[in-house]
Amino acid sequence: MLAKDQTSQQRAYDEVANVVGAGPFTAAHIDRLVFCRQVISEAMRLYPAAPGVGRLPNGPMVLGGSQISARTRVHIPIFALHRNTRLWENPNAFDPDRFAADKVKARSRYAFLPFGGGPRVCIGASFATIEAAVILAVLIRAFRFLPVAGHKPKPVARVTLRPAGGMPLLIAARANQPVAERAFSKARKAS
């Protein structure tokens, strides 16, 4: 998504440069990588790893005016929910700012479910989000991502959501990348 949105990519890079600089990443930096976490959330909104989840009610209930028995499987289409025009303005657009703190507070908790919700929410959601933001920060500091002309991701729903044919990108090393990341880059090229 950042390859196609160079303005957001630059904002993420600027945030990392301001928060971390050229030194090593530490736990103290995590809370200050606000925009990087917004980018991760927006990418998960558009392309959630689990495109849907199924649930069985604990007992008979009324859902949306319909009687549901305890044996009725209820499917929650997360991919569709995250693109619902009643919940999201311009839902097909990539806009990390929709995850700014004030906008998150104004939205229903159940409008964004990349890790499920309620008592069965993924136990690793917080860790996964932090980990993804740090990985993004490390990568964005070292590399610039550019789109492959004409490529448009086509999501394929299986157990998880995946791009058909993979996700080709053009990746360019940044001239001012830290020494450790240059060494990593050279090691990857050699292998």
Image (tube, helix red, strand yellow):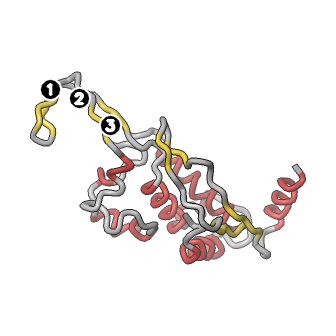
**Which numbered circle lies on residue 57?**
2
Q: Is 164 rendered above or below residue 22?
A: above
- Closer to us: 168 or 26: 168
Q: In the image, what residue occupies the spot 14% across and 26% down?
A: 60
Which residue is tagged 1? 60
Which residue is tagged 3? 119
Callout 2–callout 1 Cβ contact below 8 Å: yes
- Residue found at the very far top of the displayed protein: 71
**First in sequence: mark 2 vs mark 3:** 2
Q: Is 176 rendered above or below residue 157?
A: below
* Disc 1, SS: loop
Residue 5: give x, y in percent of width and height: 55, 72
* Disc 3, SS: helix
- Closer to us: 102 or 30: 102
Q: Is 133 rendered above or below residue 115?
A: below
User: In the figure, is residue 130 to the left or right of 65?
Assistant: right
* Disc 2, SS: loop
Which amino acid does the dot numbered 3 rest on?
Pro
Q: Which of marks 1 and 3 is in front?
A: 1
